[in-house]
Image (spheres, rainbow, N blue to C red):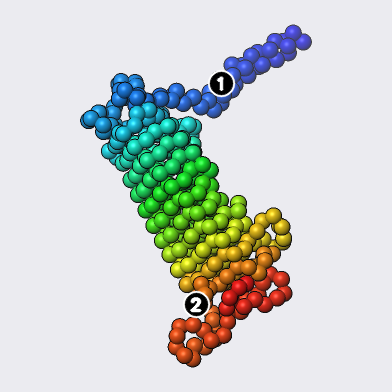
Amino acid sequence: MKKTVSNSVLLFTLFLVYTSPLFVDVATSNLIPAPPPTVHVYIRADGTIDPATTPIEIFGDVYVFADNLLNHTLEVQRDNIVVDGAGFTLKGVDVNAGVTLSGRRNVTVKNLNIRNYLVSVRLQQSSNNVISDNSMITFMNVILDSSSNNQITGNNITSQDMGYGFGVRVNSGSSKNTILGNSFIDTGIGVRVEGGDNLISENHFIRGGTNVLVWGNYSIISKNNMVDGRDGISITGSGSHNTIFGNNITGKSKCGIMLYYGSSNTFYENYLANSAFGVKLGFDREYPDRKVENNVFYHNNFVNNIQDVSIGCVPDTNFWNNGKKGNYWSNYNGTDNDGDGVGDTPYIIRREQPRQLSFDGTS
C-alpha cells in the first residue's frame, strides 16, 4: 500500500513538472504589450515647438516636418502660420485627433499623411483656415465645430473602417466653409453638413454609404462626381433652400437623390443614372411633421434607373419644371412633333399609392 501511494505521488509530481511550463507558455503568449504613451506636440502661441526635440523645422511662419511622428498628436496654438507635412506621416493609436486647431485663424495644414486616429483634423471655433493636399485614413477625418470660412481642398480621404465614419463633418454653427476638389473613398458618409451656407463642389466620391448628407440650409452642392455609393445626395432634418446642380451620380446606388425631409430646395442639371431610384421623395408612410414640399426639379437627366422617381407620403406641391422646361427621361415614350426639345405629352409615373401623377407641372 505504501508503495502504491509513493508511486502515485511520484507520478503527480512528474505531471506538474512537465505541464507547468506549458501553462506558463500559453499564458504569456497571449499577452499584448500596451502601446507607448501618446506624445502631444504643440506649436505654442509664441511660435516655439513643445517638446523642442520634435523633428519640425521652423522657417519664419512655416513649420516643416523633418520626419514621421508616430504615436504623436499636434495642436496648433498660433495664428497665421503654415504647417507643411512635406509628405511625412503623423500616426496615432485610434484615439484623439491627429491635428487640432482651436480658436485659430489663417492656419494652413498641408502635405501631411494622417493615419489611425479617431479624427484626422478637428477645427473648433476656428476660421479662415486651409486644410489642403493631405492624405487621411481615420474614422472621422475632418470635423468642423462652430467654425466658418474654412477651406477643405484637394485632400485624399479614405475611411479607416470601410463604409463607416465620416469624410468631412460640418457641425451646426459652422457656415461659409468650402469643401472643394477632395477624393472620398469608402466613407460611411462622405460629407455631412449641418451648418448653413456651405459649398460642397467638384469632389469625387467612390463607393461608401451616403456621399453627401445635408441637414442645414442655403448650401450649394455642385459638380460632384459620385460612383457606386449606396446613396448620392440625401436631404433631411428639415434642410431647406439648398441648391443642388451639376452633379453626376452613377453606378450601383440605391438612390441618386433622397429627399426625406426638406422644402424649397432646387435641383437642376444633375445626371442620375443606373440607380434603383433616381429620386426618392418622402417616406413610404406619413410623418406629418416632416414636410417635403415646394422643391423644384428641372433640366435633370434620368437615365436607365430601375425607377426614376419614387414618391411617398408627401403633398402634391413639388415641381418638375422651371416654368418652361422639365427633365430628360430616358424611358420617355412620347413624341416631339414640333422639334422644340419638349415632349408633347407629359411623363407619367406612379406614386407609391395607386394614383398617377403628371410631370408637366406639379407632382
When the figure is inspected, residue 121 is found, relative to residue 344, above or below; the finding is above
Nearer to the camera, 239 or 280: 239
State whether residue 342 appears in this view: yes
Nearer to the camera, 68 or 354: 354
Residue 289: which quarter of the image?
A: bottom right
Residue 111: which quarter of the image?
A: top left
Across and down, in percent, residue 42 comes to: 37, 25
Question: Going 67% across and 64% down the picture, which residue do you hit?
Answer: 314
Kind of residue at badge 1: Val
Q: Which residue is mark 1?
A: 24
Question: Going 45% across and 23% down the picture, which residue do you hit?
Answer: 37
Dot 1: within a 10 Å radius of its alpha carbon, few (fewer than 14), some, or many (20 or more) residues? few
Across and down, in percent, residue 16 comes to: 62, 17
Q: Which residue is mark 2?
A: 324
Nearer to the camera, 10 or 208: 208
Dot 2: within a 10 Å radius of its alpha carbon, few (fewer than 14), some, or many (20 or more) residues? few
Q: Earlier in the sequence, mark 2 or mark 1?
A: 1
Across and down, in percent, residue 253 comes to: 53, 62
Across and down, in percent, residue 261 comes to: 62, 57
When the figure is inspected, residue 303 is found, relative to residue 198, above or below; the finding is below
Question: Going 33% across and 45% down the picture, which residue do you hit?
Answer: 133
Q: CA distance from mark 2 to mark 1?
A: 82 Å
When the figure is inspected, residue 58 is found, relative to residue 118, above or below; the finding is above
Tag in front: 2 or 1:
2
State whether residue 274 appears in this view: no
For label 2, the SS is loop
Q: Is residue 240 left or right of residue 180?
A: right
